[in-house]
Amino acid sequence: MNEKDNPYADLLKIPYRPIPGRPKMSLHDRAAQFAPFAALTGFEDEIAETARLTDSFSGPDEEQIKMLNERMQFLKEHLSERPYITAICFRKDEKKEGGAFITVEGNLKYLNETDRTITMTDGKKLDLDLMLRLECPLFLQTIADRLPRDEEGKG
């Protein structure tokens, strides 16, 4: 566009006059006026959430259910000892289908057979139907007690 066709050509020739009493803006602040604008606020977070992988869990198989039930019965008998347990459970994801496997450790406080939950001394509740594995040092101790010993009492 040449100068004749530009309706603002006369404005381009006016010299700059600073406003008295107003400080000159820094180059940094001037540049900030032209910074890119994020029109899709939160879009990157949504993309990251969509890309986040989750595991699926169909529940314990029959063998695992049998073992868990036996171990829960054993723990019920030893509940007064507040046994230390390690449980591998599935935690459902709050935002999308699936979830993640977590390991929970602590002392057992209460077994609720009706709700099929166990409560730890720190207040955590675990759903037995979402449990994959349950370990306790008492299980190993009981197995060791059942092993035959030689005549000197050594294992």
Image (cartoon, rainbow, N blue to C red):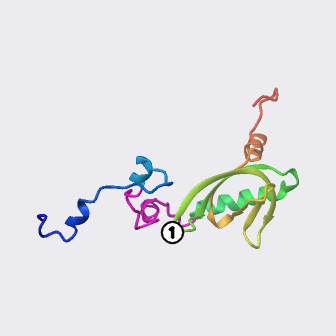
The picture quadrant where one finds residue 115 is bottom right
Q: Looking at this rendering, what residue extends furthest in the bottom direction? A: 114
- Residue 55 placed where, x, y %? 49, 60
Residue holding disc 1: 96
The picture quadrant where one finds residue 127 is bottom right
The residue depicted at 19 percent of the width and 71 percent of the height is 7
Q: Which residues are magenta?
A: 33-59
* Residue 53 lies in the magenta stretch: yes
The residue depicted at 76 percent of the width and 73 percent of the height is 114
The residue depicted at 79 percent of the width and 55 percent of the height is 122
**Would you call the spot at circle 1 few (<14 residues within 10 Å), some (14-19), or many (20 or more)?**
few
Left or right relative to 5: residue 151: right
149 vs 47, nearest the viewer:
47
- Residue 120 placed where, x, y %? 78, 57
Magenta segment, prevailing SS (helix, strand or loop): loop
Tell me the amino acid under the disc marked 1: Lys
102 vs 132, nearest the viewer:
102
Left or right relative to 14: residue 96: right
3 vs 20, nearest the viewer:
20
Left or right relative to 151: residue 47: left
In the rendered view of the protein, which quadrant contains the C terminus?
top right
In the rendered view of the protein, which quadrant contains the N terminus?
bottom left
Determine the secondary structure under disc 1: loop
